[in-house]
Image (cartoon, grey):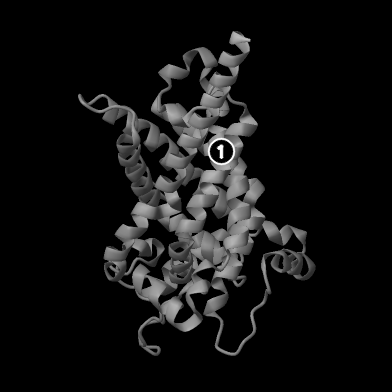
Amino acid sequence: MAADLQPRSEISFLETFFCSALAACFAEFCTIPMDTAKVRLQLQKKAPVGEGGHLPKYRGLLGTVATIAREEGLAALWNGIIPGLHRQCIYGGLRIGLYGPVKSFLVGSDLIEDTYLFQKILAALLTGAIAIAVANPTDLVKIRLQAEGKLPPGVPGRYSGALNAYFTIVKQEGLAALWTGLGPNIARNAIINAAELASYDHVKETILKIPGFIDNVFTQLLAGLGAGFFAVCIGSPIDVVKSRMMGDSTYRSTLDCFIKTLRHEVHQLPSNLIIVQDFSPSTRVSSQISVVWDHGTLLCFLPSSKLRDFCSELHERSLAHSQIG
């Protein structure tokens, strides 16, 4: 069992939550420029064949980053950072903090070392769904702010900031609007959480069985790379639908968004499969960078593990001092 994903017996759930949330916020700050570029690519709709035929504004991950920085300024790459940090405080803390307790509940605390892969996947699915159901409003506001740059020149932005976005959405669209896109968001984050946590556990266990490998930063790095790759491969189609549902109010439902995307923007399968556009030929090189950094997998798991180790050491030292006293 990957030790850094199960809660330390010496630290409480709140401490685990805090360490996970802090690590997730660090990862969010480092990776949000690429996330902003990804959202712009996903919200960009291709012109139908024979209508205009102009090249898309954003082409590839790095090209999109360069275009945003050139036209809107470097700071625009961090649009949505405030709700992004709100999101990670809730979602990042809950999805990792609940993983160990939920897994123990499913298999029994006495059998935690003999957890099967499907049990890890089920635990991660549940924790991912619970976490994003709570954090959905922050995700919605983050995407709305990231999408602002795609408005026509001269058109004022809809929101002046994160808090203004929360209040404006509630005032104009109702409280329930904060949970717009909840269906695809739960599907996406539950699936990606399962892909990340379960694959991280499994890949790490496999690596540790190879002679010469020990549980260190290098092993965690390899496991994190594998987890990020699986998460992107599995979650990309749902991620596109989720971003469009939250960033564009013209879709009536998740199914409507999925069907319209396929009908109007997929002309040559699989080369132009917009629903998995992160891997389309025009963005394949850039998408490899996205795979490595997706959701800050490495920048979240590694610091989270070290922070929880630090808390565990503090508990052990405190216990040792109390015994000496």
Between residues 303 and 173, which one lies in front from this camera angle?
Answer: 303
172 over 151 or under it: above or below: above
Amino acid, disc 1: Cys
In this rendering, position of residue 98 left or right of residue 301: right
Does residue 60 show up?
no
Q: Residue at image x 38%, y 36%?
A: 200
Left or right for 79, reference 209: right
Residue at image coords 49%, 79%: 73
| Residue nearest the observer in this picture, 232 or 237 | 232
Whether residue 64 sits left or right of residue 282 in the image: it is right
Coordinates of residue 255 in the picture (x, y in percent): 53, 60
Residue of label 1 = 19
Where residue 72 appears, as percent x and y from the top left, is 50, 80
Residue 312 drawn above or below residue 196: above
**The N terminus appears in which quarter of the rendering?**
top left
Quarter of the image where one finds residue 142: bottom right
Q: For the point 48% across and 30% down, which residue is it? A: 309
Answer with the quarter of the image where residue 314 lies: top right
Q: Secondary structure at mark 1?
A: helix
Q: Where 31 falls versus 110 (above or below)?
A: below
Number of marks drawn: 1
Residue 273, can we see it?
yes
10 Å crowding of disc 1: few (<14), some (14-19), many (20+): many
Q: Is 142 or 102 nearer to us in this picture? A: 142
Closest to the observer: 106 or 223? 223
Q: Which residue is farthest front?
A: 325
Where does residue 120 sit, x and y in percent of width and height? 45, 30
